[in-house]
Amino acid sequence: MNRIIKSLRPYPMEELNRIKDELKKKGIKIYDFGTGDPKEPTDPKIRQALIDAVPEVSQYPSVYGKRELREAISKWFENRFGVFLNPDTQIIPSNGSKEAIFHFPLVFIDTDIPEKKKVIFGTPGYPVYERGTLYAGGEPVPIRLREEDRFLLRLDRVDKSLLEETKIVWINYPHNPTGATASLSYLDEVYHICREYDIILCSDECYTEIYFDRKPPSALQVGTEGIVVFHSLSKRSGMTGYRTGFVAGDEKIISEYRKGRASFGVATPDFIQEAAKVAWSDEEHVEERRKIFKEKREIFLQFFREIGLQSLYPEATFYFWVKAPDGMSGEDYAKHLLRYGIVVSPGVNFCSGLEVMEGRCRSEYFRIALVPTVSECQEAVQIWKDAHSDLKL
């Protein structure tokens, strides 16, 4: 067995699926706030576009993607962020953001240059930054994100010797799992540090469209040289099962990445691209989704105040990053809630593998994803209230 695969702990979301299956077998009603896969229906016109595009004869799609889709993405990006992207040279459709994030280091980590194969990312964070690095033969460097820094990756505090050996830096704002956001000035600072040390800046921006107050910026607003961004329709348009998104940015990087992706077999099916084109061309359904997530957010803001749990105020994403009651770890509290059918993700699920191996993976936090419907959220908080009051603190 591949030693890298063997060394990794089970993917956190797969472990959650196993736990949920066990609860179902026991006949316990589940309120799943674990996996970030909301239940709101995909907009009918998006579904219809896919149905209408299913061909009688199916043929291989191109990694390059349909120009009509790339044009729709370019138009959306300019309208949203004020940045023009050349649809022919700066955009590649992807199968969601996860596969593109995972494959990126496979193209850009050169294992024959050991002095330039480190990859920096924040922890707690999305596990795929580290896993993609390991599969590519790179050296992952997790940087602990702290509440006092508003969970921002502080690249300005990283040793210069480490930056000189770094090939890729991953940032993710709005942030999974904390819901933290970053300002344009922060992005500008990170960008200039990366330029100084010839580092590729990768910005995972798949949550920019789930916001409640200010619109989150894109890293491409501070420059395009040496930057690539990753976007997805999974959260924005409720299309997790469609697996569709895009990668955009520096022309040279996009050109090299496109060549590499031809070997991976990840070309997006044409009928999915037709649905994606409709989704990127419409904002009305996105506004409706934001209203629903805001309603769910208000339910839990009030609930956490009522029972005295502290959480980071989520300006964006559909996540809450919550502190367990005093004296408990996030994992212990999550296990307690499971007895009542409430599924949340312990903070340790977002530790890096390196932290786990070195015994540094501890967290007082847990994450909830606003996945159930509004009515299910209202039901869940009543059950959660009983579960919380049953604690022997």
Image (cartoon, rainbow, N blue to C red):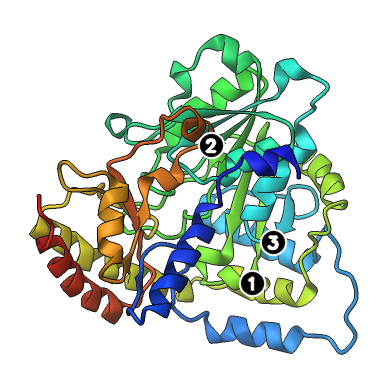
Q: Position of residue 327 (x, y in %)?
A: 17, 41
The nearer-to-camera label among 2 and 3 is 2
Q: Distance between the residues labelled 2 and 1?
A: 29 Å
Q: Can residue 250 be seen in this view?
A: no
Q: Residue 340 carries which label?
A: none
At 43% from the left and 25% from the top, the residue drawn is: 154
In the image, 386 versus 54, the foreground residue is: 386
Residue found at the very far front of the displayed protein: 26
Amino acid, disc 1: Tyr
> On the rendered structure, is 325 left or right of 105?
left
Name the residue tied to disc 3. Answer: 95
> On the rendered structure, is 289 left or right of 251?
left
Dot 3 falls on a residue whose secondary structure is loop
In the image, 314 versus 310, the foreground residue is: 310
Amino acid, disc 2: Gly
User: Quick check: marks 2 and 3 in contact, CB under 8 Å?
Assistant: no
Q: Distance between the residues labelled 3 and 1?
A: 8 Å
Name the residue tied to disc 2. Answer: 353
Name the residue tied to disc 1. Answer: 242
Mark sitting earlier along the chain (2/1): 1
Against 118, residue 34 (above or below) is below
User: Quick check: marks 3 and 1 in contact, CB under 8 Å?
Assistant: no
Q: Distance between the residues labelled 2 and 3?
A: 25 Å
Mark sitting earlier along the chain (3/1): 3
- Which of the 4 image quadrants contains residue 345? bottom left
At 56% from the left and 51% from the top, the residue drawn is: 10
- Which of the 4 image quadrants contains residue 161? top right
At 78% from the left and 71% from the top, the residue drawn is: 269
